[in-house]
Image (cartoon, grey):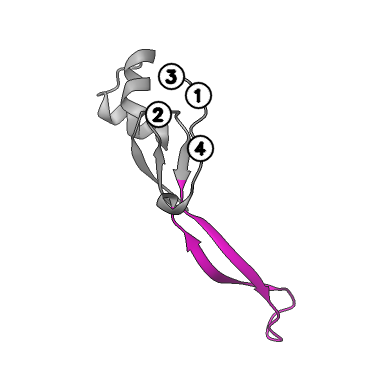
Amino acid sequence: MALVTALKKTNGDTNTNKLISTMEGMSFDTPKGKMTFRKEDHQAMQSMYHFKIKVDPAFAWGVPELVHEIKASEMNVPIRNKR
């Protein structure tokens, strides 16, 4: 999905440096929601989900129950490279 989005933005240009600069900071849709490549270190950032398993007699298995959506903006993922 990331590559398709980048190629659309570069009009199909596959030059490595052009794709890198296009993808830095780029956001695109995934099945789990929007993902963004952080420009500073190319870290893929997207929401994560805290859930617990609920026992429901209507099902023979545990049912995931959302506790909290952890947005990418809430995460303190350090930038460790020296670019």
Q: Which label sits in the foreground, 4 or 2?
A: 4
Residue 23 x, y percent position in the rendering: 36, 28
Disc 2 + disc 3, Cβ < 8 Å: yes
Q: CA distance from mark 1 to mark 3?
A: 6 Å
Up-down relation of residue 67 to residue 11 (above or below): below
Mark 2: which amino acid?
Glu
- Nearest the eye: 70 or 63: 70
Mark 1: which amino acid?
Asn
Residue 3 x, y percent position in the rendering: 40, 30
Q: Which residue is mark 3?
A: 83
Q: Earlier along the polypeptide chain: callout 4 or callout 3?
A: 4
For image coordinates 29% across by 22% down, the residue present is: 12
Residue 39 x, y percent position in the rendering: 37, 30
Disc 1 + disc 3, Cβ < 8 Å: yes
- Nearest the eye: 14 or 74: 74
Q: CA distance from mark 2 to mark 3?
A: 8 Å
Helix or strand or loop: what does disc 1 sit on? loop
Helix or strand or loop: what does disc 4 sit on? loop
**Which quadrant of the figure contains the C terminus?**
top left
Disc 2 + disc 1, Cβ < 8 Å: yes
Q: Which residue is mark 2?
A: 40
Helix or strand or loop: what does disc 3 sit on? loop
Magenta-highlighted residues:
46-71
Mark 4: which amino acid?
Pro
Q: Is residue 79 left or right of residue 39?
A: right
Q: Which residue is mark 1?
A: 81
For image coordinates 51% across by 42% down, the residue present is: 77
Q: Which mark is residue 78?
A: 4
Residue 81 x, y percent position in the rendering: 50, 24
Q: CA distance from mark 4 to mark 3?
A: 14 Å
Q: CA distance from mark 2 to mark 1?
A: 8 Å
Q: CA distance from mark 1 to mark 4?
A: 9 Å
